[in-house]
Amino acid sequence: MKKFLGSYLKQRVVGVASFMLFFIILLISFALYRLPVKAVIYPVLLCVLAGSIIFTIHFRRAYHKHLHLLELQRMTDGILSAFPEPAGADDKDYQDIIHMLLESRRQLMTAQDARYAEMMDYYTTWAHQIKTPIAAMRLHLQGEDSPLSRKLETDLFHIEQYVEMVMMYLRLGSNSTDYVIKKYDLDSIIKRVIHKYAGEFIDRRISLVYEPVQMTVITDDKWLSFVMEQVVSNALKYTPAGSISIYTEPNKTLCIRDTGIGIAAEDLPRVFEKGYTGYNGRKDKAASGLGLYLCRRICRNLGHRIEIESAPGKGTTVRIDLERDPLETE
């Protein structure tokens, strides 16, 4: 109220100054004609009373209009129908301008939605089409067991990862999601991820340390699997030799720890930024800087928290806090 009163008086400083000027002129006129004091006080009090009434009425109207407009700021649809009646030509002009801006915004949003839908259709079709030659190449490689065939199978696996990353990136930007939040057995998700990367563990001669955690979590298994796959993929990528451990800590915290090259201290605060690759990523020209960015966005949507602890030469530990409030499961 006080803030609005100050703004209200500042906008009407000319009117207030004019009233004071007329009041001073009236007093000077009475003084020049040497009128009795009672004759001066009576009209002065009438002027002050009338001015106070007019000011109070106008201020209350302006304040109520201000409160109404504050409510409109929190509205999205139907804003025009909720506008107060214009008090004059200026209000009508402002409402016409807002109407024009809202119409332009609607047209822009419609065009953006159409472009996004077209892009989603294209990349969805592209992702399904590219799986056909990938599957064909896998069939050609079946029955062969040579260093070259194993290398080609690994490259095909990475291509499938990149295709999946593109699809997840597009789905995260969509207004609709396919989350299925319910109780899942964490071990079944972990084992599925381990099985997917089993060949790379063997080829890279990286030890896996894992014991069943026997834990139930409330999450979406497909999206959590993607997060775990990205973390395990990074661990394999930046661990030339050693081991990767998967275990849990209290409060349903899933940990994936590697004995790799670690992350530089100056890069650690920014590893979740979109497109940021850091020192290790600059050495690895194939790094996109999207994996961990997608992991954080997905974890935030699922109600989880992901953190990274690392030091150069001492490996990296990724913690995913799977604790959340109980939900109504499907």
Image: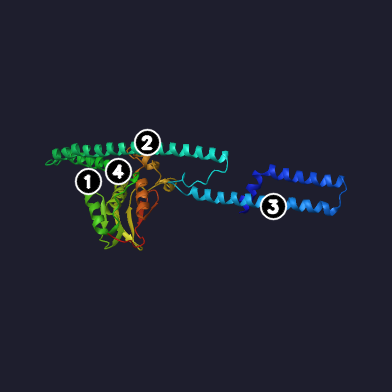
Q: CA distance from mark 1 to mark 3?
A: 88 Å
- Camera-nearest label, 2 or 4: 2
For label 2, count other residues whose C-alpha is less than 10 Å away and answer few (under 14), some (14-19) or many (20+): few
Q: CA distance from mark 2 to mark 4?
A: 26 Å
In this view of the protein, can residue 316 be seen by the observer?
no
Give the residue at x 69% y 42%. 14
Q: Amino acid at mark 2?
A: Ala
- Reading the image, the residue beneath label 4 is 165
Q: Residues within 10 Å of mark 4 (few under 14, many from 20)?
A: some
- Horizontal arrangement in the rendering, residue 315 relative to residue 135 (left or right): right
Judged from the image, the secondary structure of the residue bearing numbered disc 1 is: helix
Secondary element at tag 4: helix
Identify the residue shown where x is 17% and y is 37%: 137
Q: Position of residue 8 (x, y in %)?
A: 63, 47
- Determine which quarter of the picture holds residue 287: top left
Q: Nearer the viewer, residue 24 or 165?
A: 24
Residue 208 appears left or right of 4: left
Which amino acid does the dot numbered 3 rest on?
Answer: Ser
Secondary structure of the residue carrying tag 3 is: helix
Is mark 2 in CB contact (under 8 Å) with mark 1?
no
Q: Residue at x 27, y 56 (%)?
A: 209
**x and y percent of residue 151 in the render?**
21, 40
Q: Earlier in the sequence, mark 3 or mark 4?
A: 3
Residue 269 at least partly seen: yes
Classify the position of the N terminus by image quarter.
Answer: bottom right
Question: Disc 2 to disc 3, how far (Cα)?
Answer: 53 Å
Q: Which mark is residue 52?
A: 3
Q: Disc 1 marks which residue?
A: 203
- Please, what is the three-letter code of the amino acid marked with disc 4? Met
**What residue sits right under mark 2 in the picture?**
111
